[in-house]
Structures are given as C-alpha cells and as structure tokens.
C-alpha cells in the first residue's frame, strides 16, 4: 500500500489552526469514502511553505510514498497544474525534478468554492441570520472568482451569531461537514479523488 501525504495550504502560523486544518481535511476525506485508507494531512501554513515542504518531501520520497501538493488555484485554471502555478503571478513555481502532474492538485478557484456547492451545510453551520441569496449562484462553483466567493460568504454570514465568515476560524470547521457527493464531479475535485483512489488501494 502506498503512503500518501497531502501537503496542504492552510493554517497560517497558528499551531491551533494547523490542528484544525488537519482535522478538517481528515474528516472531509473520511466522508469522501477514504476511511480506512487515509492519506496523511500535513498543514503547511502559507502556499509558499506548502510548496517548499512538498519539494523537500519529494527529494527523499520512497518507493511506496506519494506526496501531493494541494493549494488554491487563486484564479481560473485553464492549463495543466504545474503550468498554472508557474505562470501565476505570486507563484512562479518550477515543477520539481521527479514531480508528475498527479503530484499537484488545485482547489478551484479556492477552497471556499467547495462550500458554495453545499449551501445546506452552510445554512446549518451558521444558523439564524444566514442569507443564502448573497452567495454566488453559478452551478459550476469552480467558475466563481475567489473574490466573489469570499465576498458572498461574508455578506451571507455577517448577521449570524458566529459572525462574518473567517478563513481561519470558520473554514476548517465548515470543511468537516461538507458533503463530498456535492463536489465530487467538479473537474478538479474529481481529479484529486481519482488519484487518491488509485494510490490508496
């Protein structure tokens, strides 16, 4: 069996948020039918730190190990993942020696897009005062610009007891309850699940 480690963007410099990040993704993958053959989640903080940690891991990877880098797309993704992050302003990442396309996966256009696909869960999480009409209404949430996703979430939640959506304190708790069935057919999510399914036999 291959050991998969997912080096994920998230958690900033706060160790408590790193714990929440790991838990959020762990529960999400368990709910996506990977329970019993789980990847290990490595919360890396910034996207640059996630890339650096992935590159370090790749240099010493064993025959039965497969590292995955999982970061936000930060915009529309119209090319192969490594070409996308190489061309994106602010990244300029080179494809490391030994890396394949299957090593890099993108949340498009950001993790919050996944939340938009499960408005029922958002309503349950935030409770009274949540206003779903403020959320972007595109059927394919991977087409929602990051700025629109963030703005919509903040406007929809600012009247709730939990308060305005926060990428740190709310995001990983929300991730735990997202129904993977509602996003599994999104192109980039499907690609991630197919690779995990193949590796985690």
Image: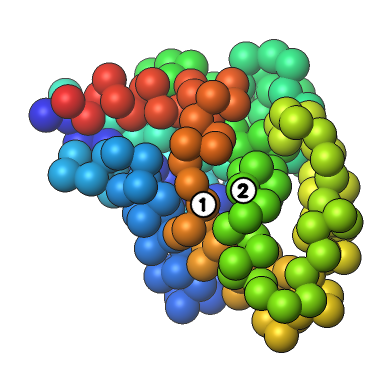
The residue that disc 1 covers is 178
Crowding at mark 2 (Cα within 10 Å: few <14, some 14-19, many 20+): some
* Picture quarter with the N terminus: top left
Asked which secondary structure carries label 1, the reply is loop
- Residue found at the far bottom of this picture: 161
Instruction: Tell which of 147 and 84 is nearer to you.
Output: 147
Answer whether labels 1 and 2 touch (C-beta < 8 Å). Answer: yes
Q: Could you say whether the residue bearing mark 2 is in a helix, strand or loop?
A: loop
> Looking at the picture, how far across and down is residue 201, in whole percent?
17, 25
Q: Which mark is residue 30?
A: none
Looking at the image, residue 162 sits to the left or right of residue 1; the answer is right
Q: Is residue 66 left or right of residue 173?
A: left
Q: Quadrant of residue 146?
A: top right
Q: Is residue 36 visible?
A: yes
Q: How many numbered callouts?
A: 2
Q: Residue furthest left?
A: 1
Residue 38 is situated, as x and y percent measured from the top left of the image, at 24, 44
- Relative to residue 133, is residue 39 depicted above or below? above
Q: Which residue is mark 2?
A: 118
Residue 72 seen by the camera: no
Residue found 66% across the figure and 74% down from its top: 127
Residue 47 appears at what percent x and percent y?
61, 48
Q: Quadrant of residue 20?
A: bottom left
Q: CA distance from mark 1 to mark 2?
A: 6 Å
Q: Image point 59% across, 21% down: which residue?
A: 187
Query: Quick one: 189 or 85, which is closer to the camera?
Result: 189
Res 87 quadrant in image: top right
| Position of residue 71 in the picture relative to residue 40 (left or right) | right
The structure's colour scheme is rainbow
């Amino acid at each position: 069996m291959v050991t998969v480690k997912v080096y994920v963007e998230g958690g900033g410099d706060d160790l408590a948020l790193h714990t929440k990040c790991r838990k959020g993704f762990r529960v999400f993958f368990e709910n996506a039918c990977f329970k019993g053959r789980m990847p290990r989640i490595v919360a890396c903080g910034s996207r640059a730190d996630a890339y650096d940690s992935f590159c370090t891991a790749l240099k010493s990877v064993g025959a039965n190990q497969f590292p995955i880098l999982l970061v936000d797309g930060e915009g529309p993704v119209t090319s192969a993942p490594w070409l996308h992050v190489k061309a994106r302003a602010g990244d300029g990442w080179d494809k490391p020696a030994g890396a394949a396309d299957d090593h890099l996966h993108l949340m498009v256009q950001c993790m919050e897009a996944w939340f938009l696909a499960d408005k029922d869960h958002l309503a349950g999480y935030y409770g009274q005062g949540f206003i779903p009409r403020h959320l972007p209404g595109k059927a394919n949430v991977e087409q929602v610009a990051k700025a629109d996703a963030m703005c919509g979430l903040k406007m929809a939640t600012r009247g709730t007891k939990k308060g305005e959506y926060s990428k740190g304190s709310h995001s990983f708790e929300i991730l735990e309850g997202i129904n993977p069935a509602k996003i599994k057919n999104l192109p980039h999510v499907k690609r991630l699940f197919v690779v995990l399914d193949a590796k985690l036999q």
